[in-house]
Amino acid sequence: MKEKIILLDKRWLESEHQKEMVMARKAQGLPAHVGPGSTLIAAMGNHWRDGCLDAVHEMANKAFQAGYPVCLWEVPDRCYKPYDALGVMRNSAYMRALEEGWEYLLYLDNDILPPSDLLVRLLERHVPIVSPIVLYSDGEDHGLGMPKMDRNHGLALVSSCVLSCLLFRTSVFLPWALIPFWQDALGADENYHFQRLAMAGHLPFVDTDVMVTAYSPPHYPLDSVDRTCHNLDETFGG
């Protein structure tokens, strides 16, 4: 009988806690990573609303105390006019996350007020793209479905969501390591970008058990343009 060959796969880890995290993921069949749950928190600029930066710091500290390496980075504001270079800023964030080897990337707007356990709870979902329910401080839904979603029903698979607070597994962006994924306004809205992600096999989840508050309503530049639209959505059969 041919002798069975055992290939060496031995990992040296920094702490018992890190070992527990690695072994737990292995037992669940989840992908291995040199820094399990490590997260680059990419804030879109440094124009923080009152209380938001302190809340984000508390969220990052809680994740670190739970054993997750974290970095909070204020992405330099490259916008000449409001929102006109957000695509470039978001591209800068995932390029840094890939280059430095972070497992996750949390996009975060400056007007988001997260609960302290937000990042930990999202990381525990182990899905490639996940958002909390984003609620607006004025109590309005602003024409969006997310604020009206049923609460406390676990993960909900959706076709698209707002980008205000969104956690990505960094490997999602590997196909775009050398070419830009995010485009700038005008026209390249959330639906367009999630259509691109769907073509690569990725749909986002919303964690209906977690809520965050946004102080500013969503802004779509094309909404303010006076355009005449004709609905020609008809289906013809042979």
Image: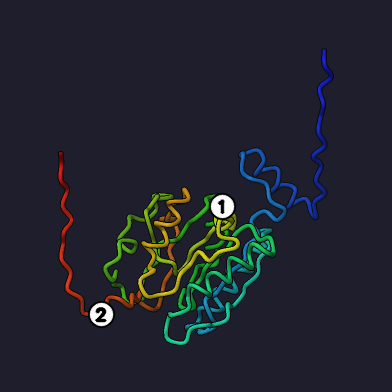
Q: What label sits on residue 225 in the rendered view?
A: 2
Q: Nearer the viewer, residue 48 or 139?
A: 48
- Three-letter residue code for mark 2: Val
Q: Percent position (x, y) of residue 71?
A: 65, 69
Report whether 139 appears left or right of 200: left
For the residues carrying marks 1 and 2, which lies nearer the camera in this image?
2
Q: From the image, which quarter does the C terminus lie in?
A: top left
Q: Percent position (x, y) of residue 96?
A: 64, 68
Judge the density around disc 2: few (<14), some (14-19), many (≥20) Cα neighbours within 10 Å: few
Q: Percent position (x, y) of residue 181?
A: 50, 64
Q: Would you identify the image quadrant in which residue 206 lies?
A: bottom left
**If you read the primary sequence from the N terminus, does the residue marked by circle 1 or circle 2 appear first?**
1
Q: Which residue is mark 1?
A: 124
Q: Residue at 63% across / 64% down in the picture?
A: 97
Report whether 84 appears left or right of 32: left
Q: What label sits on residue 75 in the rendered view?
A: none
Q: Percent position (x, y) of residue 158?
A: 37, 53
Q: Is residue 31 above or below residue 211?
A: above
- Three-letter residue code for mark 1: Glu
Q: Is residue 126 above or below residue 97?
A: above
